[in-house]
Image: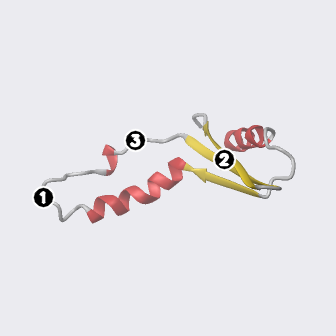
Amino acid sequence: MTKQQKKEIKRALKNLPDSVGQLDYLDLDQMVSFLVPIAVSALEAEEEIDLKVADFPKLPYFFLGWTKYVKRGLIGRAELFPISPK
């Protein structure tokens, strides 16, 4: 994780409400780079579909979600934040 990414995450964390029960973070670019080779290898046997790693886009975003316990159950919110170029 770069310094710029850390700054962007800190900025996103400033908007959290008090008493958050759970926090979820997902770097979409890392997730895609992990899943794309799996998808490509799974579809290699398909003659009609010719996918390559380059066919998939870059996703320079991270997902930050939170959940908070309240009297009547749970509330939560999730948001996508951009990751600046390195």
Q: Which residue appears at 22% of the width and 62% of the height?
A: 44
Count of numbered labels shown in the rendering: 3
In the depicted view, which residue is nearer to us: 70 or 17? 70
Three-letter amino acid code of the residue under disc 1: Glu
Residue 29 lies, in percent from the top left, at 51, 47
- Judging by the rendered image, the residue that carries numbered circle 2 is 64
Q: Earlier in the sequence, mark 3 or mark 2?
A: 3
Cα separation, mark 3 vs mark 1, equals: 22 Å
- Judging by the rendered image, the residue that carries numbered circle 3 is 57
Residue 49 lies, in percent from the top left, at 18, 53
Dividing the picture into quarters, in which one does residue 43 lie? bottom left
**In the image, is residue 84 above or below residue 50?**
above
In the depicted view, which residue is nearer to us: 67 or 1? 67
**In the image, is residue 82 above or below residue 62?**
above
Give the number of the disc on residue 47: 1
Residue 48 lies, in percent from the top left, at 13, 54
Viewer-nearest of labels 3 and 2?
2
Q: Which residue appears at 78% of the width and 55% of the height?
A: 72
Q: Earlier in the sequence, mark 3 or mark 1?
A: 1
Viewer-nearest of labels 2 and 1?
2
- Crowding at mark 1 (Cα within 10 Å: few <14, some 14-19, many 20+): few
SS at mark 3?
A: loop
Image quarter hosting the C terminus: top right
- Crowding at mark 3 (Cα within 10 Å: few <14, some 14-19, many 20+): few
Three-letter amino acid code of the residue under disc 2: Leu
SS at mark 1?
A: loop
Residue 56 appears left or right of 17: left
Dividing the picture into quarters, in which one does residue 22 lie? bottom right
